[in-house]
Image: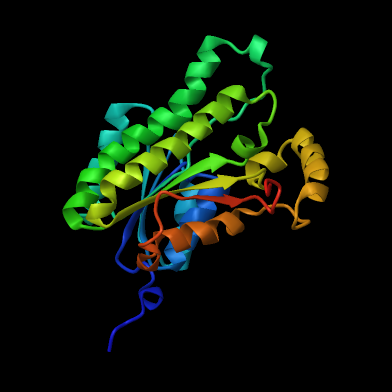
Amino acid sequence: MQINAFERGLRDRVAIVTGAAIGNGRAFCERLAEEGARLVIADLIEARETEEAVRAIGGDVLSIQADVTKPDDVERLIAAAMERFGRIDILVHNVGHYSEEPFELLTFEEWKHTLDLTLNSLFLTIRGVLPHMKKAGFGRIITFSSDTVWLGTPYLTHYVTAKMGVIGLTRSLASEVGRYNITINTITVGLTATQRTNAGGSVSSILEHILPTQAVHRADEPEDIANVVAFLALPASGIITGQTINVDGGVARH
């Protein structure tokens, strides 16, 4: 009897999640672990709480501190994943930089930093995992953009530019790697009620302004995005690639 792809979940699949220490990244790790994936979690800071959360679910996890804007760190991350698990099936690249600045006050250094962290890190990480996915004949790459690319949010020109670049990379690369049973999709997210955003009173004020404009009148939670991540990682999503899926409660719906 043929087993439905959804019933298999992600058992024995290996997922690398970057930016995994807190917030959305931690939620992604927990959700993938619930589906049976083995996790390689990476962040600039120690991700002990995420590691413990995955183990509490019963997941197998390897934690690596790495700066994915640096080629040597990315190579070390990929090598550690292969040494521990022998394969890489899924990449969830949850790295970016968010700051508000009027364009005329934006320094070239801040512009470069935003592009480096948001876009160049994605290039390096995908370049690292792709040969292993091609060899295995399976891969799921999930990238992250922002609903600000649809809204044209002011004072975020550098951020919006970088996040639009993520969409361009995703769409173009999908045409190259589909023949190897590798998909790549991007999720545009809104302001999410994460550990980081909840720490700032200004963000709470922004949420109060945004919520009435949403189609769904509640704050976006990390678990909302994690459910989409899990779906895109499943074998059953194999026909979906090169797409941009907006998950923001319906703020950008025009």
Q: Quadrant of residue 60?
A: bottom left
Residue 246 image offset from top left, x and y in percent: 58, 50
Q: Residue 27, can we see it? A: yes
Residue 181 image-quadrant placement: bottom left
Quarter of the figure with the N terminus: bottom left
Q: Residue furthest bottom?
A: 1
In depth, the one of 157 and 13 nearer the eye is: 157
Q: Is residue 51 above or below residue 204?
A: below
**Which image quadrant is residue 104 in?**
top right
Q: In the rendering, at what x and y percent does residue 144 appear?
A: 50, 43
Residue 203: % across, % down: 75, 37
Name the residue furthest left: 135
Horizontal side, residue 60 vs residue 223: left or right: left
Is the image coloured rainbow, by chain, by secondary structure, or in one colour?
rainbow
The answer to whether residue 53 shows anywhere in this view is no
Count up the numbered dots. Answer: 0
Nearest the viewer among 34 and 239 is 239
> In this picture, is 227 found above or below 70?
below
Q: Residue at x 26, y 36 (%)?
A: 76
Residue 143 horizontal/vertical position (percent)? 45, 44
Q: Residue furthest front?
A: 254
Q: Looking at this view, is 19 or 113 the one in front?
A: 113
Q: Nearer the viewer, residue 34 or 62?
A: 34
Residue in the picture at 68% in, 47% down = 254
Q: Is residue 4 left or right of residue 104?
A: left
What residue is rendered at 40% in x and 43% in y?
171
- In the displayed structure, 60 sits above or below 65; it is below
200 on left or right of 127: right
